[in-house]
Amino acid sequence: MKNLSRITETFSESVIREMTRICDAAGGYNLSQGFPDFDSPQAIQEAAIRAISAGYNQYPVTFGEPELREAISRKVRRYNQIDCDPATDITVTCGATEAMIATLKALINPGDEIIIFEPFYENYGPDSILSGATPRYITLYGPDWHFSSTELAAAFNEKTKAIIINTPNNPTGKVFTRSELQEIAGLAVKWDTYVVADEIYEHILYDEAEHISMASLPGMAERTITINSISKTYSVTGWRVGWAIAAPRITQRIRKVHDFFTVGAPTPFQHAAAEAMNFEPEYYTGLKNHYAEARDFFLRVLREAGFQCELPKGAYYVLADASGIMKQLKLTDDTAFSRRLIELTGVATVPGSSFYADKTKGSHQVRFCFCKKWETLELVAQALATKLP
């Protein structure tokens, strides 16, 4: 038989989702995949039920129901300082995942390059390859996850079509500062490069950290594609409603790709999302306070168990150094340790190497997520305290 696609041999299936399957088979505590195990807000559930009962069950407007696009436009003007026309600048997609690949397919030509900060969310590398681009990786250095200005500047060249920024960042919890974004913006303008800004954790911030949207900086609206979703902010990761915001000339291309990828995101959930966009400020304050308390508790748990880790400034992940525990268990790589951790404690994590192009950089790291109910976190704390050497 003829050979299958060569491009699919260049990357693996999601390690994050694989760890979820292993965790489920073991009946463990899933701190690997970033979804809450507590319920989504009652108000958004009721909005979805009303939408279904009202008959919003057929194909939506392909690029997004008008009510949702208008709600997104109002929200980003208020919170992100981004002015966008809901008729021409917004594409509603099946989650931020589709928004990212549809965006890259709309931007990339063969021979183009994409700059990606590592450690990175694991989709970015395969998305770049599937879109036809060559990824170029720039290291974020712990413990504060800064980048080298020299290394970043050297990565830009005539082939650079885009740079992907994830802020707040998965897996590090880094929140890019205004000065860092301005530095990246200057290079993007110099090299006529697009910026793809994944801002899905924009409301999950700690310690007075400020979320700044790249598209809000002077001169960046025309070359920035802002990607987001309702998944994390409203704890509905299974609804698959996301969007991409871009100038009309880019949006036209994204909409064409999206149309032939998925036709449209789930109609009733789009209408529920439009209602959620009108939640009062107290909702977002409560979200931040809950995760801040969970972060502080879980960091203490990890440190007492022997992990080395820094407080994340945003999102709900901790990228921890497991070197000490690995040495005690006589293990030399992150994958073996992650599997052994489930066997010993029932706690599922993600091997750190899955967030790097150079796998050796993450060989002593693991990523935990703490977007879990208190009961789960307390059980995890007990398991790590009593079942590790």
Image (cartoon, helix red, strand yellow):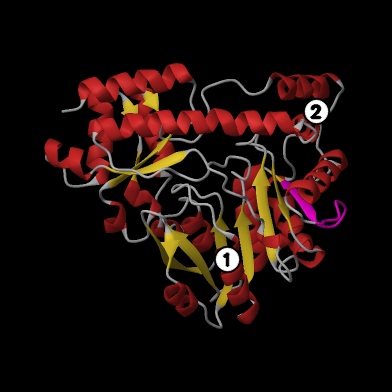
* 152 sits to left or right of 319: right
Left or right: 292 in relation to 103: left
Q: Is 19 positioned to the left or the right of 52 in the image?
A: left
Q: Nearer the viewer, residue 335 or 307?
A: 307
- Near mark 1 (Cα within 10 A), the count class, few <14, some 14-19 or many ≥20, is few
Residue type, mark 2 in image: Asn
Quadrant of the rendered image containing residue 201:
top right
Residue at mark 2: 57
Magenta region, residue range: 83-92
Q: Position of residue 366 (x, y in %)?
A: 33, 42
The amino acid type of the residue labelled 1 equals Ser
Q: What secondary structure is marked by label 2?
A: loop
**Position above or below: 155 against 341:** below
Q: Is residue 68 above or below residue 90?
A: above
Which residue is labeled 1 in the image? 179
Q: Nearer the viewer, residue 229 or 95?
A: 229
Q: Is residue 373 magenta?
A: no
Give residue 32's position: percent from left, percent from top: 41, 35
Within 10 Å of disc 2 (Cα), the crowding (few <14, some 14-19, many 20+) is few
